Image (cartoon, rainbow, N blue to C red):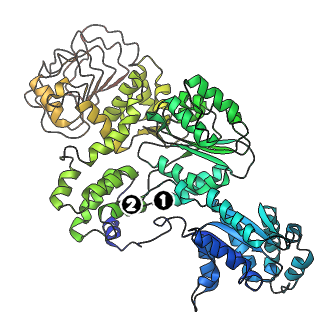
Amino acid sequence: MVSLTHEAASSLSSSLPHSSTDHQNHYTYEVFLSFRGEDTRFNFTDHLYTALCQRGIETFRDDKLSRGENISQELLKAIDESRVSIIVFSQNYAASRWCLEELVKILECRKSKGQEVRSVFYKVDPSDVRNQTGAFGDAFATLDQCKYKDSMDKWKAALKEAADLSGWPVRDDEYEGKFINDIVGELSAGVVNPSCELHVTEHPIGLESCRQDVIRLLHVDENIVRMVGIWGTGGIGKTTIAKDVFNSIRHKFKRSCFLADVRSNGLTQLQETLLFDILEDSTLKVRSVDKGVGLIKTRMRNKRVLLILDDVSHSSQLQNLVPSPHCFGPGSRILITTRDKRCLTTHEVDEVYEVKMLDYSRALELFRLNAFKRNGPPEDYLELAQRAIYYAQGLPLALIVLGSHLFRRSREEWEATLIGSCKGGPQTEIQDVLRLSYDALGPDLKEIFLDIACFFKGMEVHHVKQILEACYDLKSVTSIAQLQEKALIRIDRYEPRTNGIDKGCIWMHDLIEEMGKNIVYQESPGEPGERSRVWSGDDVDHVLTNNTGTKNIIGIQVSRRSSTIYLNAKSLSKMTNLRYISMSTYMEYECFSGDIDYLSNQLRWLGWPNSPLQSFPSDFHANKLVKLNISGSCGITQLWKGRKVRTLL
């Protein structure tokens, strides 16, 4: 959750850098060329560089540097910002300390960023590079062993690793022109073809670290089939991360497929798209889901593929698109994004990556880029910008939608938007995305979700479970776990679970809470007494004072001090299905005699500290009540007249 501090205003007004790793495209260059200048600068490397540039592939070579620059740092930066590194091993390559340091940096980027590395063995044998033998080894031996003794081992290890990678050997009896055309053709078709890239986002704030985390979980270089899930709430950036990973590693696979918006598309259409993208056979037609499954099982088994399934909403989608990891060839990688962790668990994915909310500094930067573009907020907008960031609470979707909506708008329009008075404004777009998770719930889970959104956020989880278990047929422990799996709630634990009791509170993002409450509000916008749940002080006052409650109401809660409540004996008489009453300790009651005619026998939770009641109605049986708090209720001299059986308290 985003927390605002006193430093927030100064942070907003301070000048943030206009470019950072996160802001830029990940790749300044498509290809970095590492070579020994005296061997190949004016022949092979120059011809390769020219051919790459003519094909439109942005390529870096060190003679692009101007005089006076720190070559070493510029080279390291260029390597870091390149998609592919090509190492041209020639006879004297290993005689250069600069070349060897470049090589170490290239291999570091291969491990940390998934950078593609290719070797050209220009008139040298790969085994000589691997073992530092022959003429190549003689060149390496010219380095001062004493001066560079701390680096020798890492250089040797780097040479061995690079020699073991796939590469192109250039022999004396080959035409270099044809060889270079083959290299450029292969790179253009399978490695750096920009037409195959997916658009990711204009402002990739925080994306770099997420992409690297997911790539690490994928273990791309292992020759096994591996499935990884990306899980999180709606609007948190799962699809953005998946696209970025796809763009970063797709060149490592012979075939790749990104199935977008699985939730909204038919299975046969998705199967047909998958088969076409991988097999490139337009004659294949999928007439039924079962036929599609059969084709996937028989036609994919020898294909090493990268497959992204985006926005999976049900386990049946995985069963029919990825029937088994064994349907795909060794080395295949399957990445799944979903709001429902259960889909990943039942399909036995190897790893699950949970996407977190943006921290304050990244949330501020993302909002600033959308609301003010490159400029920081004017002084008179600082407080409004803080409110917007607090409202979004680190959810990227909310920051982008709000910021874009508020760009170049007046203070009055900002105020109207932030208090939610703009019908059809950005809040609607945000809520529509979040509501997809609610719409996917079953009937009982929907009710439990609304109960938590309206009444139980912040409460001890074991108390909530006890109340819910008394209301619904299914076990509350299961329902709460399901809502966690669907990224709608979280349990903030302050102690380990002991004696079967959870030590923690239920947490829900404010925007998800707002979505739930808006669903209830839309049940009856004009009359709160017709809704299923009433929680605001004004609405409770209206319902109780005017006796407008109905059988629709299952819960009433006032969690903060409200205006004076004009309670009367008939206030609760029409609420025959009332399950929850939770009244603030600080409420004041005018003109109330202390008697109430009716309390629903459906009550499970009665929280009314400092209650003005003198006793409960005689026909209130309380046989379903599991939580009772009437502490400080000095007016109550007895609960009931006669005996009552209370089996759950």
Q: Which quadrant holds residue 153?
A: bottom right
Q: Which quadrant holds residue 601?
A: top left
Residue 395 seen anywhere in this rendered image of the structure: no
At numbered mark 2, what does the secondary structure look like: helix, strand or loop?
helix
Is 21 placed left or right of 7 in the picture?
right
Residue labelled with disc 2: 366
At numbered mark 1, what does the secondary structure look like: helix, strand or loop?
loop
Is 37 placed left or right of 143 in the picture?
left
Horizontal and vertical percent position of residue 47? 68, 76
Q: Earlier in the sequence, mark 2 or mark 1?
A: 1
Horizontal and vertical percent position of residue 543? 15, 27
User: Is 167 rendered above or below residue 327?
Assistant: below
Label at residue 206: 1
Q: Residues within 10 Å of mark 2 (few under 14, many from 20)?
A: many
Horizontal and vertical percent position of residue 549? 17, 22
Is the residue under label 1 in contact with that under label 2 (CB below 8 Å)?
Answer: yes
